[in-house]
Amino acid sequence: MKKILLSLLIVILLSGCAQLNLDVPSSSNNNEDSTPFTSNGDMIVAHFIDVGQGDANFIELPTGEVMLIDAGTSGYGDDIIDYIQNLGYTDIDYVVATHPHADHIGGMAEVIESFDVGSIYMPKAVTTSKTYENLLETIQDKNLSIHTGKEGVEVYSSDDLTIEMLAPVSSSYSNLNNYSIVLKITYGDVSFLYTGDAEEENLSEITMDLSSDVLKVGHHGSDTSTTKEFLEGVSPSYAVISVGEGNSYGHPAESTIKLLEGYTNNIYRTDLNGTVVISSDGVNIDVKSER
Ligand SMILES: [Zn+2]
């Protein structure tokens, strides 16, 4: 027990050290007079990292903690590690694997090996791929445990910041994509919705409040994910599609782009825009992209 307390203390001390880098991101905070949430570094900065055909979303929370949702294919592990280290972080407080497909967990073992990791969330989905087994072994080797990600799981909650899971709602699906954790981060008046590769079946089961300003579009913009009904619930002002240039799946679908355009013209694509960074002080939203 003493040992546990001691390591807990060390973890707290270490993660304390990692919180010095809060204002590293490039967000231009020039709206200081308009929001009660702005006090220098009190920003949320969401990085939609360009990892070709895959997802890697890194989020600097206003608490100073950071979260990684997915880690691209195995070929992008190093790039993701470099990206996070260049922001000045040595710890990742929360790691979320939306679902165990190689374009989401491929680089994750490498990332977990390279950082001090706090909590890991994964859906209760089983697959026998080498990539998945390798990830589980890495997690075990680092003596980390896996928290089950599903509807209603609260990752963080305070007056002005909540991180909660809206899906998966059911416990079994025939398509692995539908196990995708759908996660909503709300800071002040601004919400970000991350959908992994959730298909229509998963998204249509959600009963919690979907409304969000920023939508990480499901399944790389596939027409099997985003529906009219879903977008009615979300009503996004900004949409980001994480997708590889010239991918063989035809992502994103023209029909998905059309549906999104019914809500916003602020549609960003990692194949066209490179890495996209969206920051907010809890009221205003600022977007920067690589190109
Ligand atoms: Zn995917």
Image: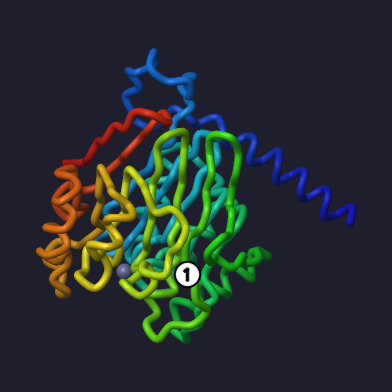
Is residue 228 found left or right of 67 in the rendered image? left
In which quadrant will I find the C terminus?
A: top left
Is residue 109 found left or right of 25 in the rendered image? right
x then y, percent, for residue 244: 20, 62
At x 58%, y 35%, the residue is 159
At x 40%, y 60%, the residue is 71
At x 48%, y 20%, the residue is 36
For the residue labelled by badge 1, is the local secondary structure a helix, a strand or a loop? loop
Q: Is residue 25 above or below residue 223?
A: above
Q: Is residue 87 above or below residue 253?
A: above
Rate crowding at label 1 as few (under 14), some (14 to 19) or many (20 or more) other CA atoms within 10 Å. Answer: many
In which quadrant will I find the N terminus?
A: bottom right
Q: Is residue 187 above or below residue 141?
A: above
In this view, the residue farthest toward the right is 2
Q: Is residue 152 above or below residue 9?
A: below
x then y, percent, for residue 91: 56, 46
- For the residue marked with disc 1, what is the amino acid? Pro
Q: Which residue is mark 1?
A: 168
